[in-house]
Image: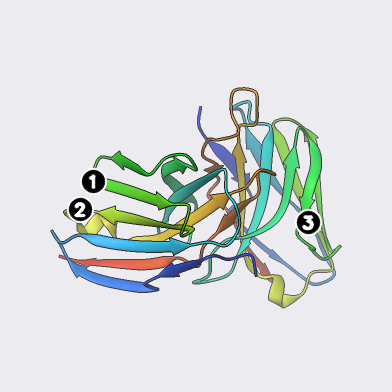
């Protein structure tokens, strides 16, 4: 299987709460990327973290990367109903393969 | 222009038909990708083109035939598909070195394919 693992598979939270999603992978990476997908259409890039970086912020998003554990996490703070979507991590390796994790379906209740 | 444009948006085809999906980008990206996505599943990589050459084929059946006529265009030719090939087909592009290689991919909105 191409996929890495993400957990949880589904997450339901109240608006204003924080959401944390985790991603694990097995092979070496150039970078780890996070994407959002609404209603089964195109994916929107959220944030990219390089293999030599440990943490990155973008607005309400915070991504961490632990290459020794081959894992990453995405934190969305102060969630909004509009954050409801599927979130995928994707690892890029040295051959520019971009492989997606299994995804987390996030529901933010108003 | 940071768009990847895919046509058509929807396609219904019979198992004996031949059709093509098209993807276009004008960002100067030299890596282009095809993905297949089934409902409630992650995108699965099918093909990668680097500098207009096929660099990765993820053991995709020969009824799917990719083509990269130039650095801006990517096609996916479809022939004798099966109903289980019905899915959302996504195209993406990203930069390669020099000037890239550690940057994000941009995705099109996809073609929703139904094989009847």
Q: Secondary structure at mark 1?
A: loop
Q: Label 2, on which residue?
A: A77
From the viewer's perspective, is residue B102 above or below residue A29?
above
Considering the image in quadrants, where does the N terminus of chain A appear? bottom right
> Residue A6, percent across and down?
44, 67
Tell me which chain the residue with mark 2 is part of: A
The quadrant holding residue A76 is bottom left
Q: What is the C-alpha distance between the residues marked 1 and 3?
A: 43 Å
Q: Label 3, on which residue?
A: B19
Foreground of the two, B2 or A70:
A70
> Residue B25, percent across and down?
62, 33
Q: Is residue A75 left or right of residue B1?
A: left
Q: Secondary structure at mark 3?
A: strand
From the viewer's perspective, is residue B88 above or below residue A28?
below
> Residue A16, percent across and down?
13, 58
Q: What is the C-alpha distance between the residues marked 3 and 2?
A: 44 Å
Q: Are marks 3 and 2 in contact (CB under 8 Å)?
A: no
- Same-chain check, marks 1 and 3: no
Tag nearer the camera, 3 or 2: 2
Q: Residue at x 38, y 63 (%)?
A: A22
**How did the renderer colour the structure?**
rainbow
Q: Residue at x 77, y 70 (%)?
A: B14
Considering the image in quadrants, where does the C terminus of chain A appear? bottom left
- For label 2, the crowd category at 10 Å Cα-Cα, with few meaning under 14, some 14 to 19 and many 20 or more, is some
Q: Secondary structure at mark 2?
A: loop
From the viewer's perspective, is residue A40 above or below residue A95?
below
Q: Residue at x 54, y 65 (%)?
A: A4
Q: Are marks 2 and 1 in contact (CB under 8 Å)?
A: yes
Q: Which mark sits nearer the N-terminus, 2 or 1?
A: 1
Tell me which chain the residue with mark 1 is part of: A
Q: Could you say which disc has been placed on residue A60 in the image? A: 1
């Amino acid at each position: 299987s191409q996929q890495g693992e993400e957990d949880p598979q589904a997450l339901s939270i109240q608006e204003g709460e924080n959401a944390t999603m985790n991603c694990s992978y097995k092979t070496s990476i150039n970078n780890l990327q996070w994407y959002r997908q609404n209603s089964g259409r195109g994916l929107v890039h959220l944030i990219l973290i390089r293999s030599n970086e440990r943490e990155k912020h973008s607005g309400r998003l915070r991504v961490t990367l632990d290459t020794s554990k081959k894992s990453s996490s995405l934190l969305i703070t102060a969630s909004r109903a509009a954050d409801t979507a599927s979130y995928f991590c994707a690892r890029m390796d040295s051959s520019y393969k971009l492989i997606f994790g299994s995804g987390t379906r996030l529901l933010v209740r108003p | 222009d940071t768009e990847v444009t895919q046509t058509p948006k929807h396609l219904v085809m019979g198992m004996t038909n031949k059709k093509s999906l098209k993807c276009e980008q004008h960002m100067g990206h030299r890596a282009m990708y095809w993905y297949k996505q089934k409902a409630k599943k992650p995108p699965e990589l099918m093909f990668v083109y680097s500098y207009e050459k096929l660099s990765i084929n993820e053991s995709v059946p020969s009824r799917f035939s990719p083509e990269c006529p130039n650095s801006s265009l990517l096609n996916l030719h479809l022939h004798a598909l099966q109903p289980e090939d019905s899915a959302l087909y996504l195209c993406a592009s990203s930069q390669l070195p020099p000037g890239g290689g550690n940057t994000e991919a941009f995705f099109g909105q996809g073609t929703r394919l139904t094989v009847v």
